[in-house]
Amino acid sequence: MSDLTTNTAAPAARASEYDAQFGDYFALLKPRVMTLVVFTAFVGLLAAPVPVHPFVGFCAILFIAVGGGASGALNMWWDADIDAVMKRTVKRPIPSGRVQPGEALALGLALSGFSCVFLALATNVLAGGLLAFTIFFYVVIYTMWLKRSTPQNIVIGGAAGAFPPMIGWAAATGSVSVEAVLMFCLTFMWTPPHFWALALFMRSDYDDAKVPMLTVTHGRRSTRKHILVYTILLAALAIGTGFTSVGGPIYLALALVLNALFLKGAWDIFRRDETLSEADNFKTEKSFFKLSLLYLFAHFGAILVEAGLARFGIDLLGAW
Amino acid sequence: MGIAHEHELHQRRRGRNIGVGLTLAAFIAIVFGLTIVKIGSGDFGTANAPQQGQVQNGN
């Protein structure tokens, strides 16, 4: 009882002595996650076959980023209780007492409305609607519902992070095509192995927060199997994308190398047991996690390069 | 002696106020820029204005 009183009183006491600074509100928008959103949306926008005025393109990316940030603020508002018990998130603005939960809710709602309306005005209604759906999906479907109720939370919730390239594409073309869906699928299929690798070496965090990660509900052996299966499916998808209009020889060469490395990493994780992992402090799992970051950025970077070459009329293989 | 004495609150919130001010200035610049681009590219055509081709066909 006394512990609980101390725990809840501490942030309140700190909050009364501290005025939130601009950076604290900015931290609510999860700037690190925003870099992924900005980059993939930018690739989706430039890979689209319809050219966009540079200023409209800049605004579209900005509004998509603000929308992504707004969903991050709403996520932090709802998850303040579990953020306070996880080492990885305990320094976030709400659990550390720098920002009040109500402020995060107000900021998240205001920026959600602003970003969707302005994206629709700057580009088209489809793009604005897709951004609204993405925020709804991340906040309501993932954060409020799935995250605490199913070990498949990451799989389905990953869709929210996969929408930005599709929104970028829709902002340019006013429609959604096979290429946009493939870019969506790339991030969607990448998310589970990326987060399950993190869950393997951040075990106590999710245990403490009672978040039903696969590692907690189905065990770590099952998680290792899941990583391998999803990585195989992801590799097939990533290489297959190379044969569509957003792919090309550079993308395909890079995809072959990166997917071979990624499959090797997943296989190594599958073959290891807990004793071995704990002995070297999850070295393989950590390097797989780092590789997963490079993996996604490199794939989208290659799509960007292919789009740039096409725009300048450079055709590397003629009839690719 | 100044007419208004700066409260301690103003000093504590200086960073935040500057940040909000710059954000609002950026917002104005974005809306202005978008307006110029949209007008320049002809996205804001008058709703009831007849197209040139339609006028010619009508004559």
Image: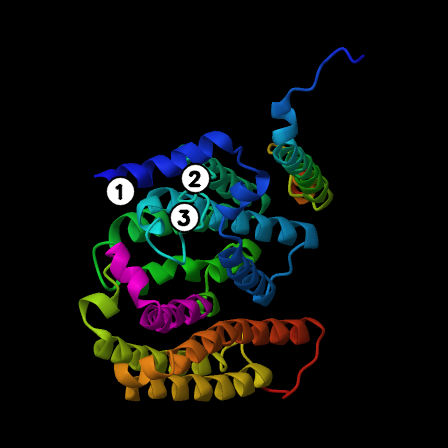
Using the image, name the chain to which the residue with label 2 belongs.
A
- Image quadrant where one finds the N terminus of chain A: top left
Chain under numbered label 1: A
Magenta span: predominant SS is helix
Is B42 magenta? The answer is: no
- Residue type for callout 2: Gly
Q: What amino acid is labelled 1 in the image?
A: Asp
- Residue A134 x %, y %: 40, 51
**Residue B17 place in picture, x, y as percent:** 63, 31
Mark 2 or mark 3, which is nearer the start of the sequence?
Answer: 2
- Which dot marks residue A97? 2
Q: CA distance from mark 3 to mark 1?
A: 36 Å
Q: Position of residue A51 (x, y in %)?
A: 64, 60
The boundaries of the magenta stretch are A181-210
**Residue toward you, A113 or A241:** A113
Judge if badges 3 and 2 mark residues of a common chain: yes
Q: Please state which amino acid type lies under the numbered disc 3.
A: Ile
Is residue A172 depicted above or below A75 in this figure?
below
- The residue located at (36%, 68%) in the rendering is A195
Q: Which element type, helix, strand or loop, lies under badge 1?
A: helix
Relative to A13, A173 lies left or right:
right
Viewer-nearest of labels 3 and 1? 1
Disc 2 to disc 1: CB gap under 8 Å: no
Query: Which numbered disc flags the more N-terminal residue, 2 or 1?
Result: 1
Task: Kindly identify which residue carries mark 1.
Answer: A3
Residue B1 as seen in the image, left or right of residue A251 = right
Kindly identify which numbered label has been placed on residue A135. 3
The circle on residue B11 is none
Q: Position of residue A129 (x, y in %)?
A: 44, 47
Pointers 2 and 1 within a single chain: yes
